[in-house]
Amino acid sequence: MTDTLRVGIVGLSAERGWAAHAHVPAIRAVEGIELVGGCASSPESSAKAAVAHGLDRVYDTAEELAGSDDVDLVVITVKVSRHRELVEAALTAGKAVLCEWPLGNGLSEAQELASRATDAGVPHFVGLQVLSAPFIAHLGDVVRSGEIGEILSTSILASGSTWGPTIASDQIYLLDPAEGATMLTIPMGHTLAGVEAVLGNVTSVQATTAVRRPTAVESPDGRVHERGTPDQIAVMGTLGSGIPMVVHYRGGMSRATNFHWEINGTLGDIVVTGVHGHMQMGMVRIAIASRDDQKLHPLPTPGEYERVHGLPETTPAYVVAHSYEQLVHGLHAGTKTLPDFADGVRHHRLLSAIEHAAATGTLTPVEPPARNGLHS
């Protein structure tokens, strides 16, 4: 690897998609890392993406990208159902790999990939970018400082925007459980990772899921599609220190509350609000009332928590850029700064426990995290 980490993105389109909107500007905002190439769904799409993003190198396939001597880190930003084959291609080529969340299409695939990555002996990371968000780091420090006393409970009410009454043509796959991209795995999964980073790991769950809107209307052509994944998920859980947790995600958007997270303590309360349930994108407001405060007041994130400058906090690239900054720093320092595949497996176990609890109606334990977990 050169002094500058050279990145190739699998799933890089010319204009649309998470890679174009979040990863490309994030990489370009971070020192010590460079986007050198990408590939899309076809050679023609790859060529268009190269022109759109000003790239000299064009790769027709993911295998060609992973095998290139010009690429140090392979970033996977495609449908969850293709994660395994593309991560395996990068590992076979001996390349470091960053796979967007979810790591695999279910717990079993995630375990397989973690085992393969360990055997390959290359750096491997999973895109739980909420763990890199400056506001999450600050919240954790505020809670641990005792500013609001001993934590009594925590609760979240949120909207899983995409899983509502209408759906865009390029997102129809989100209705298919076989694709692995659900309201549980994506917005709720990312948010639960942030909750655990601030308050500690979930140890047991009870859950109810439901399909309350059995169909979704495709926009703009009006075709009706059956919904195969829940649009209502309600979870009651307990964190390791005994803190009760309640989380309810509703598909679509609400005219009232779209993201409201409360942390209640013996000396005060913290409230995090946002415009949707995707906490991993940032774009939240935080307020606190503690000790003698009679009402909430803003709790801005201090500047020292911001490690990347030049990106507005209102863009999805802002939090992703902080993930890349930590990745580069960790590789150079030889320290663990981002969640790896083992951490991804642990988080998959939490989501698997929620699914089991919902299917059986039983209280379900969550397997303890690995000892090297980022927030164990």
Image: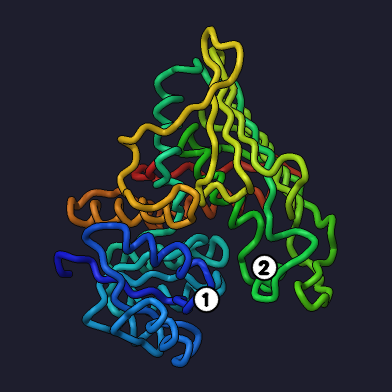
Q: Which amino acid is tagged 1?
A: Arg
Name the residue beneath numbered marker 2: 174
Single out the residue that lies furthest toward the left.
Answer: 3
Q: Nearer the viewer, residue 6 or 227?
A: 6
Disc 1 crowd, CA 10 A, few/some/many (<14, 14-19, 20+): some
Q: Is residue 124 left or right of residue 189?
A: left
| Label 2 secondary element | helix
Q: Tell me, what colour scheme is on the image?
A: rainbow
Residue 121, quarter of picture:
bottom left
Q: Is residue 262 left or right of residue 308?
A: right
Residue 239, quarter of picture:
top right
Relative to 22, residue 371 above or below: above
Relative to 35, residue 273 above or below: above
The label shown at residue 82 is 1
Relative to 68, residue 98 above or below: above
Q: Position of residue 55 (x, y in %)?
A: 32, 80
